[in-house]
Image (cartoon, helix red, strand yellow):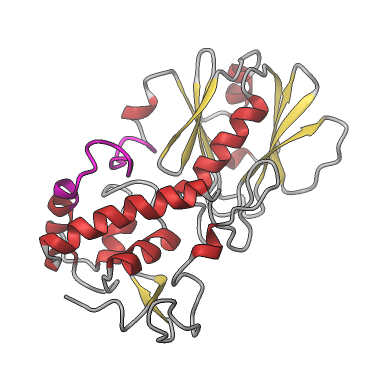
Amino acid sequence: MDVPELPEVETVRRTLTGLVKGKTIKSVEIRWPNIIKRPAEPEEFARKLTGETIQSIGRRGKFLLFHLDHYVMVSHLRMEGKYGLHQAEEPDDKHVHVIFTMTDGTQLRYRDVRKFGTMHLFKPGEEAGELPLSQLGPEPDAEEFTSAYLKERLAKTNRAVKTALLDQKTVVGLGNIYVDEALFRAGVHPETKANQLSDKTIKTLHAEIKNTLQEAIDAGGSTVRSYINSQGEIGMFQLQHFVYGKKDEPCKNCGTMISKIVVGGRGTHFCAKCQKKE
């Protein structure tokens, strides 16, 4: 299962904002302490959040940022993490690991089958300079993410371009789905060495990264296996996939069967005819 990527996390951010913005936390129940990474003591995490009001919810790459009165909670969903708003009397299950009970009687529940998700608590402004956010590259829609920047980053590595784009230090939010889709749209073979791409190809790839992510955000993300947003709605971008999850199906452009290989340890979909190595 692939981690929710930027479009999915952005969709969760938008839906969560509508659900919990302005709500005040009455208490926090932590059932699986390993999810809490900072502070070291989960009890302190719960104590600090008690009485805090959710002012807004931001996003940095694949991380959600809950902006509270005196803290910022940085949350990563990893593979299976999901937030849902429930009435306190609604039953939960063994996969609900953190419960934020609000003063209005509702509960924001964090459910995670794999238990890989993480939560960090910072004072406002500290989060950008500390792990897990401090080493992240630019957002794909940021001014600094230019084709010149992408060229500079890719020129420094002889890794496969697929692997280089998955590196969150290069650009944040891209995962397996959207790298495969952007590479297809740009006509780039995923095994091409990153430092061998021409200037023209990099400009095309840069544009397709931005276009692919924006179209996916507009569609509410991709539902692949388990992703749904915080209101239980599925994303629809998977209907627009050209290659991801399409192994042995005909390419929408040329009819060649889509191939699947492993690049940098990740399953990778591409069209051998439309995507040539440079």
Horizontal and vertical percent position of residue 59:
45, 35
Q: Is residue 163 above or below residue 275?
A: above
In the image, 168 versus 94, the foreground residue is: 168
Q: In this view, does 57 lie above or below 69?
A: below
Q: In this view, does 187 lie above or below 15?
A: below
* Residue name at image x 81 percent, y 42 percent: 92
Residue lying at the far front in this picture: please name it.
253
Is 195 displayed left or right of 180 in the figure? left
Horizontal and vertical percent position of residue 61:
40, 42
* Residue name at image x 65 percent, y 48 percent: 112
The quarter of the picture where the N terminus appears is bottom right
Horizontal and vertical percent position of residue 130:
35, 31
In the image, 139 versus 115, the foreground residue is: 139
Q: Which stretch did the figure color magenta?
A: 132-150
Main SS type for the magenta part? loop
In the image, 141 versus 51, the foreground residue is: 141
Q: Quadrant of residue 227?
A: bottom right
Is 134 displayed left or right of 100 in the figure? left
The quarter of the picture where the C terminus appears is bottom left
The reply to whether the magenta stretch includes residue 140 is yes
Is 143 displayed left or right of 250 in the figure? left
Determine if residue 251 is in view.
yes
Determine if residue 1 is in view.
no
The reply to whether the magenta stretch includes residue 124 is no
Horizontal and vertical percent position of residue 232:
70, 46
* Marker count (numbered): 0
* Residue name at image x 26 percent, y 74 percent: 191
